[in-house]
Amino acid sequence: MRASDLLRPAPEGLYCPPGDFFIDPVRPVARALITHGHSDHARPGHGAVLASRQTLDIMALRCGEDFAGTTEAARLGETLRIGGVAVTFYPAGHVLGSAQIAVEHGGTRIVASGDYKRRADPTCVSFEPIGCDVFITEATFGLPVFRHPPDGIEIGKLVKSVGQFPERAHLVGAYALGKAQRVIRLIRDAGVDGTIYIHGALARLCDYYRSQGIELGDLEPATVEAGARRDFAGAIVVGPPSAFADRWSRRFPDPLSCFASGWMRIRQRARQGGVELPLIISDHSDWDELTATILETGAPEVWVTHGREEALVRWCELQGIAARPLNLVGYEDEGD
């Protein structure tokens, strides 16, 4: 079977004609397979949703219990059949519950990576390279300039700053799903065992991570009304980036703005956002990890999506790997 007959781009997203389903559709469809719980991939309103148990739970937390007509949990590594198409979910290492989706029919196997990272992360299952005929890779950081430093070095900058400026509250912007919990875990692994304060938007997801056995230590709500401003001197406060752009952040004593994101590699972006302490921590693979992963899959053909497609397509061509951009629309950078 030709790969384009097994999966093809459509206005709704990646469509599988033999199985009559979509992968991460951007608008409501009859049957959707979802790679992970970020809102640009996991939207409500589908007739039926197949995803990992944790992704289904996260979608219920974020979208409401009735986010789909019916749901079915896929076990990682277990093959299901949909209209004669073999479907298997494999770990993606992006956030809790994230998965790659392999579809196989007529002797052709395609693996859709969804979003993925290759760094060790105690808050989710690590990425597993899967051999295939076509590998569909994301390219959020698909330019050679993006080479993420070790996570420990970046978190070390935060810990050092807290020690240098004990009179200031360190406000760490981190996306609510995945990045916030990972940053908290990295702070713990750096030896900080005191209270970390969190914005209310993180509470339910942090509670869910804990229910899945992920230790985050003592977390308290970052409500200034509960105590004087001075009580937050020297504190680490984690919240969604949007919260630090409004009056909420100004409640804290001499707040020092931090932002954990792969985009902090671009200094101008940090300056434009008023970020004093940029932390280059990403839940996406960097350039070296993207190219290494493509080689590990052994795929003779690569389709590139979600980001800087042209550079990665060109790199594949130079390696003798057939490649093309998918030009899918509707996917943002919620988990960068």
Image: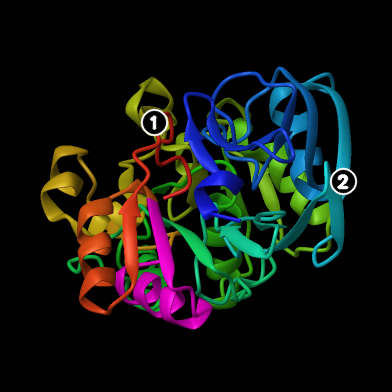
Q: Position of residue 211 (x, y in %)?
A: 85, 53
Q: Nearer the viewer, residue 151 or 135?
A: 135
In this rendering, the answer to whether 185 lies above or below 274 is below
Q: Nearer the viewer, residue 238 or 194?
A: 238
Please say whether residue 277 is visible from this viewpoint: no
Please say whether residue 156 is visible from this viewpoint: yes
The number of numbered badges drawn on the structure is: 2
Q: Residue at coordinates 83% horizontally, 57% vertically from top-left?
A: 212
User: Would you name the residue on which mark 2 appears?
Assistant: 73
Q: The magenta stretch spans which residues?
A: 285-304
Left or right of 15? Residue 291 is left
Q: Position of residue 210 (x, y in %)?
A: 79, 55
The kind of secondary structure element at disc 2 is strand
Q: Which quadrant of the structure image shows residue 247?
A: top left
The kind of secondary structure element at disc 1 is loop
How crowded pointer 2 is (Cα within 10 Å; few <14, some 14-19, many 20+) is rated as some
Q: Nearer the viewer, residue 64 or 217?
A: 64
Is there a contact, CB below 8 Å, between mark 1 and mark 2? no
* Magenta region includes residue 297: yes
Q: What's the residue type where badge 1 is placed? A: Val
User: Would you name the residue on which mark 1 appears?
Assistant: 329
Q: Residue at coordinates 42% horizontally, 81% vertically from top-left?
A: 295
